[in-house]
Image: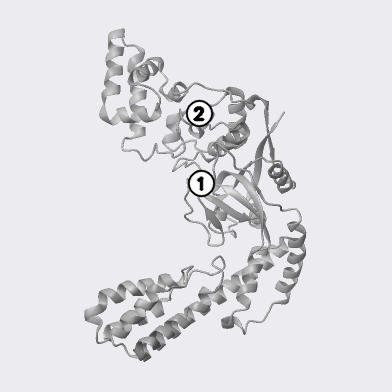
Amino acid sequence: MMIRLLVRSLLLSSMLSFQAMAASTRPIVKLSSETESYFNSRIKSCPGYSALNANIAKYYEGFKKDLNSDTTDNYNTLMFSNTVSDMKCDTGFLTEFVKLVNKDIIELHKFKLARWRQDIIDFGKKGLSASAQIAKYNEYIQLSSLKDVIKDPEVEKFIREAKIASDKRKLTCTDVINVKSPLALDKPKNQDSIGWCYAYAASDIIAHATGVDVSAVYMANDYNDNFMRNLTGEDEGGYINQVLDKAISKGVCLEKDVPSTDFTYSRQGYDIKKLMTALETFSKSYKNASEAEKKILIENICSQADLKDGLKYIFPNKSTGEIGKILDNLGSNAYRKLSLSCSKIIPPGLKNLKVKSDHGSSTFETMDKQLENGNIVGIHYNAGVFADYRDKFSSMNHASTIVGRRFNPKTNSCDYLIRNSYGKSCQKMNEDYECVNGHIWIAEDYLKYSNTLKSIIYVEKK
């Protein structure tokens, strides 16, 4: 029992002070190759290894997960320590292992501190406060593992300047969330692998302004005048303002008629590209066919198992007979089939909207004004910021909407809420961001750094 308690004490002491850090600040611990190699080679020499090797492998992985857990119950660590004790490993082996784990944590602390120190300097030289990084820097500088770190006078200067700027920004960065029906914080649409982000952002803007849920897929198709080419990966890019202009002038389709809430064209069991090719072939044959031949052509395409389901997905509210009539009206242009899948509508107030944009020095001031007036704002930006706010070189052009703002007391930063268009996914997000149901809170200075934000687009009543 005494050995078991000693093992447990050694392991827990290596992690509790680390876990006490704020979850948003605590970095991800990955054990070094030296530590991994030492453990994997020495554990095999324990007398009870052959009988308990399956358990030790499972709980060792669990111990590593505990290091990065937001909770402190440390169940896997306790089971790991118990198993090591039961294997009758010598305490010298475990003591050395814990030393290596502590060394890994300290090295990570030093790496993170150096990175945030450089961020504070880089942001400060651009006149930005780097408030989020300063909060993390201040927490790390207090760690006993970093007690010998000498404070940098240049960093301290920028921290003082940032405090003044943050106190001033707090007065104007009031909390705003502009998400109302038919939009919802727990139901962002999903563009999947198709590059129609601009249309998804535009559809959210129209929905917010009119209270009518409109189809992003239809708006993308109408903007490009060519559905099939977009499915095959061509001409996927676009601009929010141009999509909005076209929608306001020509009308829109309802989401229920042309679904885009969870864009499954590329994930269904049927092949949508095959369907579009079949429709193109059909329209060419149909053009010069007799009336009897036309009837046979319609029956054939509506009866093929691998095309039938695709037709029903594209025309969700149409019977087979009505689909036949649509095919009869296609003529020689299969690409415009979405125009026939719904009746265009002009939602109340749509014609009274005017599209505006800003991409100059007043961009953030304009965005704040729109949010404070209850509006949402479309943005064109470099999505590389989601992986790394230091990203200066990637050109991951993306479009989304900003639907909220808050002052974050933990980081002393003004944050904006980006509504993305990949459903509820929060994958591939930097650990510094708070992401909930596909909505990402991101600090104002991250959007300003490296000119991440390119332009904003919004609508106002004429």
- Which residue in the protein does label 2 denote? 254
Q: Residue at x 40, y 25 (%)?
A: 317
User: Residue 351 is drawn in which quadrant?
Assistant: top right
- Which residue in the protein does label 1 denote? 186
Quick one: 177 or 118, which is closer to the camera?
177
Q: Residues within 10 Å of mark 1 (few under 14, many from 20)?
A: few
Local secondary structure at mark 1? loop
Is residue 63 visible to the viewer in this orientation of the structure?
no
Q: Residues within 10 Å of mark 2 (few under 14, many from 20)?
A: many
**For this view, does 375 lie left or right of residue 91?**
right
**For this view, does 7 lie left or right of residue 105?**
left
**For this view, does 70 lie left or right of residue 96?**
right
Q: Position of residue 145 (x, y in %)?
A: 56, 82
Q: Quadrant of the C terminus?
A: top right
Q: Nearer the viewer, mark 2 or mark 1?
A: 1
Quick one: 358 or 29, which is closer to the camera?
29
